[in-house]
Image: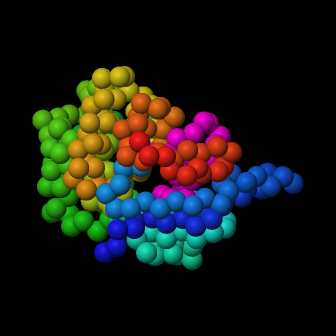
């Protein structure tokens, strides 16, 4: 298995808005190695979300080459892309997207319904993931009884229960207070120590500073990485 997890070569994304061509992403070059902790920062409208959606296989690039674990994803069918995303990519969002009427354990279990985890293993994996984020004692609670920081930890447990190759986090601390933010960032540090690859998109300099490498975006262009 090679150290390279993701490679983008001159990747672009163009949209049509009436008669106007909008270049949301311009010739992006990026390599992410296994076990790396990378942060992508930039102002609103800089192209961060477009880049994230392409890396996460939620959108298709219109130019360039994108390889994920050595596979050129350009020509993959939607079914193949969905399968790759379900098995190899974990997601954490600003909004927790937890089901209010389900317990914490049930929320984590649901992440494994479509990624070939045998039914008998799902609850065991869910409890192990909750233990990893320090919330096994909340397993039977519903999300409404949890703090914002705890709900984000459940969302992280849900993402890592599938054992992804990379955890992609989109403004993961945007709805948290400073204490909860620090708790989540400490968890990211721990997960990185376990060997998990992390890609965090944020506008918060304090959050991006925790990564080992920062990439900046402006007007759809990706800068050279900056050592931190």
Extent of the magenta region: 39-56
Q: Is residue 149 left or right of residue 38?
A: left
Q: Is residue 41 magenta?
A: yes
Residue 53, quarter of picture: bottom right
Task: Kindly identify the residue that appears in the image at 36 percent across and 50 percent down.
Answer: 37
Q: Nearer the viewer, residue 209 or 107?
A: 209
Specify whether residue 159 is in view. yes
Q: Residue furthest right?
A: 19
Q: Is residue 124 magenta?
A: no
Q: Is residue 180 above or below residue 118?
A: above
Q: Is residue 73 above or below residue 196?
A: below
Q: Quadrant of the N terminus?
A: bottom left
Residue 98, quarter of picture: top left
Across and down, in percent, residue 48 comes to: 57, 46
Q: Quadrant of the C terminus?
A: top left
Residue 59, quarter of picture: bottom right
Q: Residue furthest front?
A: 227
Q: How is the image coloured?
A: rainbow
Specify whether residue 61 is in view. no
Across and down, in percent, residue 192 comes to: 28, 49
Q: Is residue 123 above or below residue 149?
A: below
Q: Is residue 95 left or right of residue 182?
A: right
Q: Nearer the viewer, residue 172 or 206?
A: 206
Task: Kindly identify the residue that appears in the image at 51 percent across and 34 percent down.
Answer: 203
Q: Is residue 128 left or right of residue 80?
A: left
Across and down, in percent, residue 29 comes to: 57, 61
Task: Kindly identify the residue that appears in the image at 14 percent across and 40 percent down.
Answer: 136
Across and down, in percent, residue 113 comes to: 30, 60
Task: Kindly identify the residue that appears in the image at 45 percent across and 64 percent down.
Answer: 6
């Amino acid at each position: 298995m090679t150290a390279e997890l993701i490679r983008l070569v001159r990747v672009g994304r163009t949209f049509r808005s009436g008669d106007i061509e909008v270049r949301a992403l311009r010739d992006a070059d990026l390599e992410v190695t296994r076990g790396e902790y990378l942060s992508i920062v930039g102002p609103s409208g800089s192209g961060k979300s477009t880049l994230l959606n392409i890396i996460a296989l939620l959108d298709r690039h219109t130019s360039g080459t994108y390889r994920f674990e050595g596979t050129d994803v350009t020509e993959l069918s939607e079914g193949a892309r969905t399968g790759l995303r379900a098995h190899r990519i974990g997601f954490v969002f600003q909004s927790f997207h937890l089901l209010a009427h389900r317990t914490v354990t049930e929320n984590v279990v649901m992440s494994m319904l479509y990624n070939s985890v045998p039914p008998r293993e799902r609850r065991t994996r869910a409890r192990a993931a909750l233990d990893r984020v320090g919330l096994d004692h909340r397993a039977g609670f519903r999300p409404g009884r949890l703090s914002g920081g705890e709900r984000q930890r459940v969302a992280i447990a849900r993402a890592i229960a599938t054992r992804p190759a990379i955890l992609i986090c989109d403004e993961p601390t945007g709805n948290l207070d400073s204490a909860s933010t620090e708790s989540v960032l400490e968890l990211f540090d721990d997960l990185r120590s376990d060997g998990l690859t992390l890609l965090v998109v944020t506008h918060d300099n304090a959050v991006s500073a925790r990564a080992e490498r920062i990439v900046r975006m402006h007007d759809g262009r990706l800068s050279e990485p900056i050592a931190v």
